[in-house]
Image (cartoon, coloured by chain):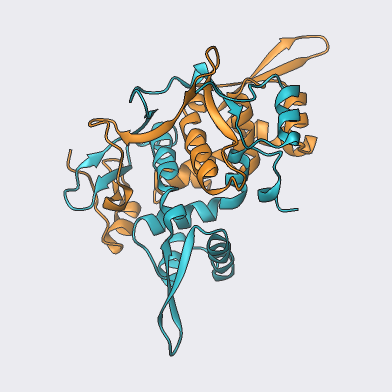
Chain colours: A orange, B cyan
């Protein structure tokens, strides 16, 4: 059974399984920066063609990337982010923030900027309602209305909340 | 050479390399939910002990997790998030948001809640300055003051901005 179909897993686990490995994350990053051709990814990532081809196919079949034929003869394709792929960019932005803080021994080396003004944007995760920064030490993950019996069993065994108070 | 030391990579790539694979992400999620003992991770993740042991060692050596001996004879340890590990929780929260939207066929199944009130928190990435949601299609990643000559070469070849306007 594909992990993606396992209803005893939480959406974090399913998402991680769906995205794939570190190559997929770097391909998504490159797509988010406007790279679009197979050769561009290959050159930028120094990735073996077979591996790149496989990762792109997976991203396409999982719905994060769309393959567009832009020439018939010989057939040539480019790759672009779908809505689901674009929705993954906030995750990459927060990985960048973490990397700048905890994995950049020489200091700040990657920034998110507005394409036209080059002004720096500092991404931060806040509570959508209050716009206040989230104190993660006070939070935990909980179940939701779509939980399967299998997932409820896991949550109960771990004394985790089964649902949120809205 | 460890990827982590390669200054031609961006902080996203280094961060991804530092975190490791999907198991490491799930271990960090469990640590963020208060799981702390080897047996708890093993039971919850259905992970082979050898794999779990290796992933925990990597997370400790990369500085995201601290191993604490809480009993001498026989020696027993628990695992807790360091500051760097806690700083990774916003990434997992945004993976949850993506998973709920794009990888939860039966509907909402994982929520972030306040431990004491069980009130639901909806995490969102905003511009730290304006508190407005970020339009990722208008943004790109750029270099920063700590860029190595190798990284500047890559950015130049790709016509990427070398630095932000502050």
Residue B50 rendering spot, x and y as whole percentages: 59, 70
Q: Nearer the viewer, residue A146 or A131?
A: A131
- Left or right position of A15 against A10: right
In the drawing, does residue B79 fall left or right of residue A112? Answer: left
Q: Residue at x 66, y 49 (%)?
A: B4
- In the image, residue A126 sits, relative to residue B25, either above or below, namely above
Specify whether residue B153 is in view.
Answer: yes
Tell whether A153 sits left or right of B28: left
| Count of marks placed on residues | 0
Residue at the farthest bottom position: B73
Image quadrant in which you'd find residue A154: bottom left
Which of A159 and A5 lies nearest the eye of the viewer? A159
Residue A63 shows in the view: no
Which sits in the foreground, A18 or B164? B164
Along the horizontal axis of the image, is B94 left or right of A73?
left
Q: Residue at x 60, y 48 (%)?
A: A105
Q: Residue at x 31, y 53 (%)?
A: A137
Position of A154 relative to B152 (above/below): below
Question: In the image, residue A153 lies at what x, y percent?
Answer: 30, 58
- Above or below, A53 relative to A81: below
Q: Position of residue B47 (x, y in %)?
A: 52, 63
Q: If the image is split into quadrants, where does the C terminus of chain A sit?
A: top left
Residue A13 percent across, percent down from the top left? 46, 47
Q: Which of the 4 image quadrants contains residue A26?
A: top right
């Amino acid at each position: 059974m594909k992990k993606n179909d396992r209803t005893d897993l939480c959406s974090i686990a399913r998402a991680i399984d769906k995205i794939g490995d570190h190559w997929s994350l770097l391909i998504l990053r490159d797509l988010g920066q406007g790279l679009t051709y197979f050769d561009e990814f290959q050159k930028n990532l120094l990735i073996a063609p077979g591996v790149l081809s496989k990762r792109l196919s997976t991203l396409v079949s999982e719905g994060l990337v769309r393959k567009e034929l832009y020439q018939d003869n010989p057939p040539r394709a480019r790759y672009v982010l779908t809505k689901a792929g674009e929705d993954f960019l906030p995750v990459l932005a927060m990985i960048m923030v973490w990397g700048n803080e905890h994995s950049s021994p020489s200091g700040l080396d990657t920034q998110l900027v507005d394409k036209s003004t080059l002004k720096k944007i500092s991404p931060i995760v806040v509570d959508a309602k209050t716009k206040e920064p989230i104190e993660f030490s006070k939070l935990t993950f909980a179940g939701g209305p779509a939980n399967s019996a299998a997932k409820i069993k896991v949550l109960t065994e771990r004394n985790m909340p089964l649902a949120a108070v809205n």
